[in-house]
Image (cartoon, rainbow, N blue to C red):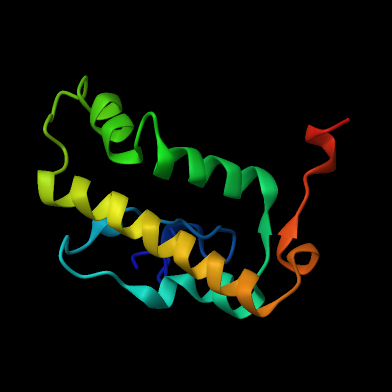
Amino acid sequence: MDRHHYETFTIFGNDTAPLHLDHGRGFGKAMHDELSILAPIYQCCIIRSSTLSQLLKFHNGPHHLSKLMKKSLSADPLNPVLLETHMVAIDRRLAIVLHTVRECLRNHPIEDVIIYDTYLYE
């Protein structure tokens, strides 16, 4: 939700570029799932096979996304970076993404939904 805004360095006048800032709102409220960010999936119903494969691995294990995130963040000097409620939300939101893809597959032919990454199979 924090990507809907940009800043520029005004001291450079018109010779500047957009600067995206991450204010740490990417995880938002742990108990609220912002479903509007799924619009690109449910409106277009297209996903790369490699992306879907990775999401399924994170969902089915053996290493769930929240556990991998926790392990990755464990060395951070600010550890714990995320609360346990956010870790639960990560896995819950992943399930919501996969449910959205499943709905696309129910409503559209598989070849229209899943775009195979040909370079992965060459």
The N terminus lies in quadrant: bottom left
- Residue 120 in which image quadrant: top right
- Closer to us: 8 or 50: 50
| Residue 108 appears anywhere in the view | yes
Residue at image point 59% right, 59% down: 15
Residue at image point 60% right, 47% down: 51
- Residue 68 as seen in the image, left or right of residue 106: left
| Residue 7 appears anywhere in the view | no
- Say above or below: 114 vs 87: below
Residue at image point 11% right, 33% down: 80
The C terminus lies in quadrant: top right
- Residue 73 as seen in the image, left or right of residue 35: left
Q: In the image, residue 72 lies at what x, y percent?
A: 30, 26
- Closer to us: 96 or 77: 96
- Closer to us: 9 or 43: 43
Q: In the image, residue 71 lies at what x, y percent?
A: 26, 25
- Report how many numbered discs are placed on residues in the image: 0
